Each structure stands twice: as structure tokens, then as C-alpha cells.
Amino acid sequence: MAIGTDPEGVDTAERRLRLSRELIISAAVSFVDHNGLAALTMRGLGKELGVEAMSLYRYVNGREDLLEGIVESMVSELHLDPATMEPLNGWQGYLQWLAHGVRRIAHEHPAVFPLIATRHPAAPWLRPPLRSLKVVEDFLSELISRGFSDESAIAAYRAFSSFLLGHLLLEAAARTKHDVMAESLIQAGLSQDSFESSITQYPQVSRLGTSLSEDHSDNEFEASLENMLDRLDRTLAH
Amino acid sequence: MAIGTDPEGVDTAERRLRLSRELIISAAVSFVDHNGLAALTMRGLGKELGVEAMSLYRYVNGREDLLEGIVESMVSELHLDPATMEPLNGWQGYLQWLAHGVRRIAHEHPAVFPLIATRHPAAPWLRPPLRSLKVVEDFLSELISRGFSDESAIAAYRAFSSFLLGHLLLEAAARTKHDVMAESLIQAGLSQDSFESSITQYPQVSRLGTSLSEDHSDNEFEASLENMLDRLDRTLAH
DNA sequence: ACCTGAACACCGTTCAAGT
DNA sequence: ACCTGAACACCGTTCAAGT
């Protein structure tokens, strides 16, 4: 199967796409998915795109701006879009939709999620993982238009972001492939072996080892989410 | 005021302490407290200690091992020490003590806390921020000896770590001094101004700006902790 | 307009050499 | 035994130069 020549006269197979901010960011996301955050360098990403590192600086304002772009591109998937969305069952339906949307992102890009979780937001009240003005605006107006007071909407926003951050950062860490973070492991050297042998000194940990490793994250997430929605409901009816 | 000469014949004022792993780690913690994680380099830390970077390699197994040492030194403050501790009021007292201990660490070292939160643990079930075999062993045996079944103790461990991680990572981010993370801000350049002007496009965010910025973290933490303890109590009595 | 080569100031890390 | 100088292979970033 020969590689053809397209009408424009460039070979299609390896010819790189025209560079753009969007292309660079999506290449960076896929790079991090495969190689981990620590491996993402301007030079390495340039090579992945068939270009010198310096070319990227036309489109992103340095590495920090690239990371910011990655965060923004992921979080913008959570914008409320009335055109394409099924109707929501009240504020609880909205919070369910939002929670599962963030969770899907964390599952699809576990190696990127720590970036969303720990990069310092532009304002202190722009709490991870909901790091977008539009998302926060949607959140507040959805709740306020459905009976929340200003204060209870803000309290809900704070409780909701803490809840998502704690659960999803731990789920993402558990799902990050271990070869993606080989860097830290090889460096540890002996510590993996010494870790496993030192477990025997801790009776409960040893005894419960297999149960501790079981994954119940689906059930735990849903149960905690339900609990939070119930709490919010009670404060509403106070 | 002249600098004296001590009995050993070395000048006391600037003479560096004898290097050791502990000294290096505690210097690194204080360096991160003042300058942020991104500024911590082997060379810079060496200079802080009055020594070349290469000297550190006698005591720490490279930068990754240094970061691991920082995490371990912080988390080991949470070891249960019967000798020095006031008696605990049952499992609820233990969980209260543990929660407030982790919170104190997060408040004292907000720039270090993301390290505790996001470094990949040695085992997947060693969940941040309780990243220590001894702490997990204490946790499980305290609860099991006080009436928890194996399964409910493990469920409590999972819920407790998610709770602490979400709340404390956000509290730590809010408390990290903005000049400590100047690196990301200067790089952003224009984005701080454009961010503040774009706020006007979001009515709820604009209207609630000052309320959004208020700090209720003490009350929120205590209320969420109480709620969690109540939930655990109910599953115990099921 | 878009990309690159060369250069600069930094990294982490190794190792032979000093004391 | 403990620390260092010099070196290596990498970074991010700038800027004049190419096409």
C-alpha cells in the first residue's frame, strides 16, 4: 500500500499538520497521557510534532502557558451547552452531570488530572477542579435560579469542589499507569523491595492487604455524591 | 560585634552544620516554604547549606529521593505515640486528632502539601495524604479494636483520605503565598489583567465576588468532618 | 509568515580527584 | 570520610537569521 501524493503535492503520511495552539495543546495532552507529566518538555513535544522546540513559541507563551492551555482545554468540556444537552432534572441533575463530567475527564486523562488539581488558579476562589469562570458562573446561576440563596450556592460550590478534588485525584492516581511514571520508580531503586518487605511489620496492613487493594471507587463515588446532595438538600430546606 | 572562635577552632556564625540526611531534608522543607517547590534545585539547596550540590548526593539518592524524604518527614509527625499523647476519646477522638494533625501540617507548610498530595505512593492503597505504612496501620488497628469490621475500617480509611485530600489541598493552595509562586505568574504575563477584566462578563461571579473570596475554611472543615464521623457511626450501627 | 541554528543560563547527575 | 571541579546530557528561552 503505497503512500500517495495529495492534490497539494505533499505526501500525506508524515506531513505534519499546520501548527496551531489547539494542535500543540492536544498533542501535549496525548503526550502526557502516554509518557507522564514529567516527560513533557518543549523539545520533546516539538519532536513529536516534527518541528523544532523554538517553533512552539509562536503559539504558546512558554511552557507555563502550555500547561495552562492544557488545563483550560480539559475544563472547557464542562461548559453548559443548552443546544446539545438533554434537559437536567433540577439542580441535582446539574450537579450529577457536572460531577460525572469531571470524573470522566479524570478517568480519560489520569496523568493530566494532577495539573488541574494543583496548578495555582488565576483567583483564589477559582477552586480546582472547576477551574473556569464559565463553569463557576454556570454553577452559581443554575443553583440560584433553582432556589438556592447566594450563601448556600457558594457553600455548595465549596463543598462540591472539595468533594470532587479529593475523590478524583485519588482515583486518577490509582489509574495512572505505572510505566507512565517510571521516572520516580527507577530513581527509588531499592525502596520498592524494602517497602514490600517492611509490610510484614504491620499486622493489620498485612492481613488486609488484598482487601485494601480492591477497587470500589464507582460505589464510593456515587455514595459520597448522594450524601453531598442530601446534605445540600437539607440546608436548602432549613 | 566580632565573630568568635569556638573551642573547636571554627568560627561559629557561618560555619555550616555537619551535613546529614535530616539536615538536608529540613533545609529543603524550609526552602520550599520560602521559595516554592519549583525553585527547589539541588544546586540551590546546596548553596543554601554552604556546600556544592554534589555533596548532597552522599546523603540523598538524587532529587526524587529528596522529595520522598520531605514527604516522609512530614507524615511521620502523625505517628501515634502513646507516651506523649493525651488519651483519645474512642475512634472518633482518634480521627479528630489525625484530621487536625494533617491539617496543621498543611497550614504550616502549604507549599509542601501538594507534594504529599500528588506524588505517587509506593503502593496504590497508600493513599495521600496518609502516606505512611505506620499511619495506615495505626488507623486500621485503632478502628478495628474499637468495633469496626475489617470492611468498614477500610471504607473509613478510603473516605477519610478523600475527605482530607480535597479539603486540605484547597486550603493549602489558598494559603500559599503568592510571591512564593511568582514563577507561574510572571510567565502568565497579560493573563492576570485579561482575567480580571473578563470577570465582568459573568454576572453571578461579579455580583458574588466578595462573598466568594471570604474564608470559611475552619467552619467548613469542622462541619464536613463531623458529617463524615456521623456517616461512619451510622454504618457501624447498621 | 513561519520555522530554525546558535547561543545563553540553567538543570540533575557521574566520577575522578582533592583534602 | 567527606567534599569538589570538571564534564555530560539535558532543560527553557531569546534572537538574529533563513526560506
Image (tube, coloured by chain):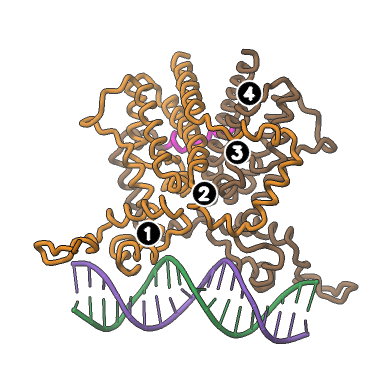
Chain colours: A brown, B orange, C green, D purple
Q: Nearer the viewer, residue B21 or B26?
A: B26
Mark in the foreground, 1 or 2: 2
Q: Is residue A1 visible?
A: no
**3 and 4 marks in contact (CB < 8 Å):** no
User: Which segment is the magenta one?
Assistant: A210-218
Q: Quadrant location of the C terminus of chain A?
A: top right
Alpha-carbon span between mark 3 and mark 2:
14 Å
Circle 3 residue: A125
Alpha-carbon span between mark 3 and mark 4:
15 Å
Q: Position of residue B230 (x, y in %)?
A: 47, 18
Residue A72 sits above or below residue A146 on the image = below
Q: Position of residue B129 (x, y in %)?
A: 43, 40
As drawn, the label of residue A152 is 4
The amino acid type of the residue labelled 3 equals Trp
Label 1 in the same subunit as label 4: yes
- From the image, give the main secondary structure of the stretch colored magenta: helix
The amino acid type of the residue labelled 4 equals Ser
